[in-house]
Image: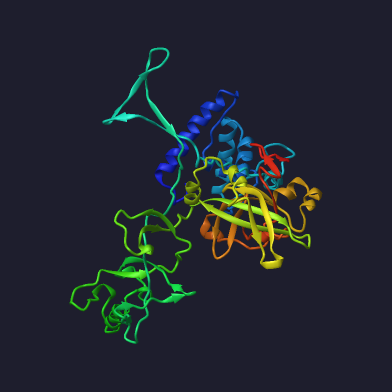
Amino acid sequence: MPKWWKNSQLVDTQIISKYARAYLKSLFNKVDVQKGSVTAEFRNIFGIMGDEKKDRSKHSHHAKDAAVLTLIPGSAKREDILKKYYSAKENGRKYQEKPYPEFEAVHVLKIEENVLINHVTKDQTLSETKKKVRKRGKIEFYKNEAGENVPLIMQGDSIRGQLHDVTYFGAIKPVERNEEGYAKKENGSFISKQKDGKDEIWLVKKNEIENAKIDDIIDVPLKNHIQNQLSSGKKITEVVDFNNKKIRHVRCKVKSLTPSKALYFKNHIFKSKHIHKQQYIARNTPGGNYLNILYEGMNPKNNIIRAYRIISLFEFSELGISDVEKLKADKAYKSVIKGIGKNSTSIEIKVIIKVGFKVIMWNKSADELNTLTIQQIKSRLYHIYKFNNQGCDYNYLQHHLEARPDGELGDGETLFNPDKYQPRLKLSSDNFNCLIENHDFKMNNDGNIIWI
């Protein structure tokens, strides 16, 4: 068991093995369960793997283990082989045996070339919710046609998922300041900073002083005071304000979120006279992007042009629809303008993408897939694991075999290269050259590809 596993995960696998064995015994005459350590020993006995550590970087290692399991003999012969193997190991010798005369290790190792990992996702975002009706905490019952008392069920449409982050932000208008950092006044009013001819808006958040970045502090005189205290040798937690009291919290500018990207989702009960302070403000959750609409068309030069439009769960909830396909008929979503001025072109929705969709990449043209073997096509199979906006909208793809954690993979390359293995891709709309699941192809549960 890996060191980072929790004990509950081990218990889960034991329970799964127990019930899987019982289920399989109802279908097959001979079913056996092997410990992972026994499978590892037989990998060595059959010469499939030497003393090197098992490679878990690709999901295909499960298929290789499954193949080894089919080669392990019954209990009597298995114990005899293991006894010989351990005896040879104690004497510093190697012991190998073939499960059948024509066996070669490459028979198992080549499985990776033929395995297709079918990542199956279930979108429950719009699943109808049901709950028992209660009155003063007690479940309400009614009599059905058979005269039985059954619970009264209430059901309706809803959105399943977190619509926004739980941290709320404030909004302020920054002001012009003098050399000492104090706000300037004109006719008794503060002078707001201007941006594009309008008052600038900053999103702000109150942070504990030990977690605050000094440069982000809004109050300039307070920031200067803190810097002076730190330069005199005090620790950040020992800094005191002008009244000789410890500073515990400071208001800081939120640089990672602009007002145009923030979510304004509810009015305050007691409204401020300032419009920019009248609503609760939060950011989208890390997994809060629900849909990515792919638009595609041809420009005057007969070249393919594309665009993305990412729809957050919060934005979708505001539309009040229960079917994503209705977006194709909505005037606000069914088309976008790509380009500027005379070079602009209106392009329409090609497909609405969700996380989990699989894609098959092509390089110069989709027609090139017609000349490839099924093994070569599988090497181009990816699944979409997220989409996000980082100044530009991106689809994030992961190779279907890839099993390493996020920390080892990063975001991936921004161009597909068919001549090398790319575990992840980060593709803008212009580089999203692929066939898309449910639009160009479907995949059976056994991994077979069916072209539409």
Side of 168 relative to 225 (left or right):
right
Q: Residue furthest right?
A: 371
Displayed quadrant of residue 394: bottom right
Image spot of residue 4 (x, y percent): 44, 51
**The C terminus lies in quadrant:** top right
**Image position of 180 with respect to 174: above or below:** below
Is residue 163 visible in the rendered structure shown here?
yes
* Numbered marks: total: 0
Displayed quadrant of residue 427: bottom right
Residue shown at 40% from the left, 58% from the top: 282
Residue shown at 42% from the left, 14% from the top: 145
Residue shown at 48% from the left, 63% from the top: 260
Image spot of residue 446 (x, y percent): 66, 37
Residue shown at 31% from the left, 76% from the top: 219
Judging depth in this view, the residue of 404 and 46 nearest the camera is 404
Image spot of residue 340 (x, y percent): 66, 67
**Image position of 10 with respect to 154: above or below:** below
